[in-house]
Amino acid sequence: MELITPSFGLTFWMLIGFGILFFILAKLAWPVIIKMISDREKFIQQQLTQAEQVREDMKNLKSEHQQLLIEAKDERDKILSDARKMAEKIDDDAKLRREKETDAMLAETREAIKNEKLKAITEIKNEIANLSIEVAEKILREEMKDESRQEEIIQKWVEEMTLEK
């Protein structure tokens, strides 16, 4: 049992050692430990305050970000609208140019067709005149084979010429 129950001298010296240790710790270590704990507490409080400030800043940034997104979408919509209007204007201008070019080409084509038609009519008239002359020559040759007939025709022509003048 002696091992379990300490003697009075051992207990006394243990209490004195503990008291000295307690006194040394109270004078030297606890103020430092308490100061460190206090500093740590202040640091943690500052970090919490900063975290709260950052959280508020993030909320503000988020709302600013949302506002910027809305403004960017509005700007994008405006740019797209302007681009559509410009594309429509370019398309309308191109249509007008195509219509003018088409009208000009049609006018040129009509003029060319008219000229070709007149040319064809002139050629047909010339051909008809040549054929008429050939037919007249053939008829006259047939009619003029006989000399009496020749004199009769010439006399008739002379009479017709004098009457017309």
Image (spheres, rainbow, N blue to C red):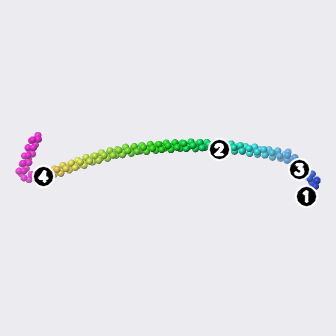
Task: Compare marks 3 and 4 and give the one earlier in the sequence.
Answer: 3
Dot 4 alpha-carbon crowd within 10 angstroms: few under 14, some 14 to 19, many 20 or more: few
Task: Compare marks 3 and 2 and give the one earlier in the sequence.
Answer: 3
The amino acid at mark 1 is Ile
Label 3 to label 4, Cα distance in Å? 167 Å
Q: Residue at x 83, y 46 (%)?
A: 30
Label 3 to label 2, Cα distance in Å? 54 Å
Location of mark 4 (residue): 139
Residue 16 belongs to magenta span = no
Label 2 to label 1, Cα distance in Å? 64 Å
The disc at residue 4 is 1
Q: Quadrant of residue 74?
A: top right
Span colored in magenta: 137-165
Q: Residue at x 8, y 43 (%)?
A: 159
Q: Quadrant of residue 104?
A: top left
Task: Compare marks 2 and 1 and give the one earlier in the sequence.
Answer: 1
Residue at the farthest left position: 148
